[in-house]
Image (cartoon, coloured by chain):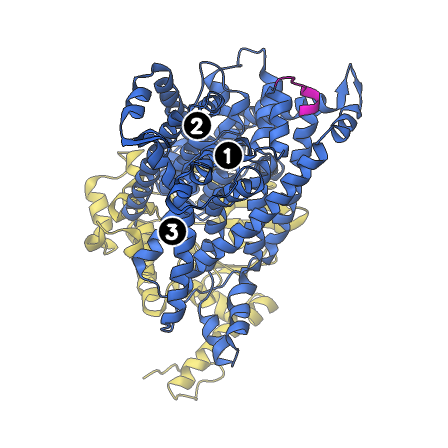
Amino acid sequence: MAKRKNVEIKIIYGVIFLIFLAFLIVPFLRLLNQAFFGEGSFTIQYFKDVIQGVGFLDALKNSLMVSIWSALITTILAFLLAYTIYYTNVPGPWKKIIHGVASLPMLLPTITYGFAIIYSFGKQGLLTRLFGIDVYMYGFPGLTLGYVIYTIPTAFMLIYNTMGYMDKKFSVVSKLMGDHAAASFHIAVLRPLLGTLATAFIQSFFLSFTDFGIPDSVGGKVDTIAGILYEEMLGSIPDFNRGAVIALVMLLPSIISIVVLKWLERYNIRYNKISAVELEKNYVRDGIFMVISGCIMLGILSIFAVIFVVPFVEEWPYRLGFTLDHFTSVLQDPNLLSVFTNSLFVAFCVAVVGVLMSYGAALITARSTLNEKLKSVIEAIALVINTIPGMVLGIAFLLTFSGTSLQGTFLILIVCDVVHYFSTPYLMVKNSLSKMNASWETTAMLMGDSWIKTIIRVVTPNAFSTLLEVFSYYFVNAMVTISAVIFIAGAYTMVITTKIKELQYYNRFNEVFVLSLFILVVNIIAKYLFQWLAKRTSRDSK
Amino acid sequence: MLKLENIKKSYDGTTVLDGINLDIQDGEIVSILGPSGCGKTTLLNLILGITEADSGKIIYNGEDMTNIPMEKRGFNIVFQDYALFPNLNVYKNITYGLKNKPDISTKEEVEDLIDLLGLREHLTKKIEQLSGGQKQRVALARTMVMKPKILLLDEPLSALDGVIKESIKDRIKTIAKEYHLTTIIVTHDPEEALTLSDRVMIVNEGKIAQFGNPDEIIHKPSGEFVEKFILNQLRIKRNNIFTLFGDKKNTTEGKEVRVS
């Protein structure tokens, strides 16, 4: 009886497992093979070559340093923003603006921020011209600024979510016990938040360390690990063996980060009851935090401003008349237009396939009686994917699928994105499914439903708002990702981000910014549309 | 008639149920009573068909059900937490099974059930708008629409408070009598078991300690366990109530019960 019941689950399991086998495990083994086997025998010669190679250790050091610094800055800024929302009486709309601005960078590819920084601070930059700020941004300053902007949304959301679950009464209790401001801040805010602050730091570090777009655009003469990895694979003298070794080196800090994150989970504090307490009136405090959060937001927005300015003027910075010519020329260029539709097509397919994969996997782990060992395979895959940077996955795909019929197809791009972003959606769905009543399937079966009917009639309607969130997560990320797809997009399967990289080569920055604006607009529409739909469905079912 | 023959079940080497034999007559209300961890929920799951027995047989009206899958046995259950579907309103929950088996209950039968369980005014409500007792009645109605051969109730009263408890008890009795329905209830509360059922089966450590009608259990307890844990609990309860009403005469045997 139990055996028959699990047939559908086993089929889903089989399909998911085969996808991961072909598109995660095999490519990864291929990467290891490339790094350790030369002319048929095991060797560590490639490792030696890379480490002794000119500039490798410097690049590694640069990457580590700049990622650590920007992670530190990001964590502090994100904390200040979240603190302003939860612990001050700044006006409600201001809090909403903070929330919006802090998540804005998510909607653009990192390569765009890099160019935006150059166009803001360069000799002829927007900010330079407006305020006379002239800072040399190529290299460390640009990298740091780029990484901070890139990682602020992630760090902010982490801290913001934990702060929402912190019991604000503790501040009151602490004050009643006679604590001074500093002691009270420590016990009621900092201490419970410590785990999350560390998590935010590590996540920011991981994202910066493995990002490709920012060093590509503002790295200048400073070598980073992402930069030399790209050079080894797609540069003038490609060396796949050395590339594979560098990819493995890039994997190392990622693995360490994830292990530390897992370990940090135990420091998360969960309050049983969250009580909101009216904050005492303190105009000085509110004023200070309004200024601080205002400055941070202005910083983020000023970098973005250039994206809205450059494509609308005739020829930055020499002829500043308003024009829509750049837009019309992009819209009339069939090549660029097809890149745009390619991106939409890929993002849509990624979202659909991604929802199915994460839903299927979560159904297995959260709502089936399948063998625990089989379930733990899925858990392990989700965890492992979290540690694999996009660039490493892209290179593994490049090594594995070059010369096969999959090379240069949309299919490979879609699968790559789905696998790359699998962890978060999987956890989102699993979390939502495991909160549902455990007896639904049994009950529905007694009412004559088959398993699949129960899933359609009961489980899916109740998971719908989460599935929409997952759809939007996959869609937005597929629109902005560059690190993995740069290695596998073919001539006919160019998406916007890979096209931007190509346009950079020809210095066609007007087109770069026009295409970036397209991505931004599409993502804003997608994000708010799905947010609205999710809110509507979750309200309907209540 | 439901017959269990020598049922045995163990998990990871620990025996949960051992040598369970029992007969339940048609239309009878039987409670399975015992402390938590005694195996009563496992027994319920075995009858329902979620769990498979290691050995022994389950026979219903002469037919061997042991290897028949849950959904084909024709038994049904109301879970302790009701498992109502929150995406559907009350009426859609009640008629859920009709989508699959449109002929199992007629329109009138469904309407009768709705009235019998007092759900008429709640039909268009969302599940989360209901109180505990109302949810219990909706779950009961939804199960009854399927015309189960045996109705299983898992701790049907434990999530409810005082007065509601008594009224649900009455509804369960009414339903069982009205439909001549074999009803098996799992509970850990002796008072509940003895006031609700025709016969009570007391389970302890995987074995049947006693199986008899309430009168037999009260007056002829089979052994130390029944005496100590079941009857003693009831006496304490009774004394507390007598004390509350200021009537201290009946502290020992309580033949002359006078509550004024």
Residue A1: in sight, yes or no? no
- SS under mark 2: helix
Dot 2 or dot 3, earlier in sequence: 3
Residue occupying image coordinates x 56% and y 57%: A268
State the image coordinates of residue A5 (x, y, percent, origin top left): 49, 32
In the rendered view, would you say B149 is above or below A19?
A: below
Dot 1 or dot 3, earlier in sequence: 3
* Marks 2 & 1, CB-CB < 8 Å contact: yes
Query: Could you confirm whether marks 2 and 1 are on the same chain?
Result: yes
The residue range painted magenta reads A236-243
Identify residue type, mark 1.
Tyr
Quadrant in which residue A521 is drawn:
top left
Q: Which residue is mark 1?
A: A421
Q: Which residue is mark 3?
A: A99
Residue occupying image coordinates x 52% and y 45%: B4
Q: Which mark is residue A350?
A: 2
How far apart are the alpha carbons under marks 1 and 3? Answer: 23 Å
Image side of residue A206 versus residue A107, left or right? right
- Please tell me the colour of chain B: yellow
Q: Which mark is residue B86?
A: none
- Please tell me the colour of chain A: blue
State the image coordinates of residue A408 (x, y, percent, origin top left): 50, 15
Identify residue type, mark 2.
Val
Identify residue type, mark 3.
His
How far apart are the alpha carbons under marks 2 and 3? Answer: 27 Å
Image side of residue B90 versus residue B38, left or right? left
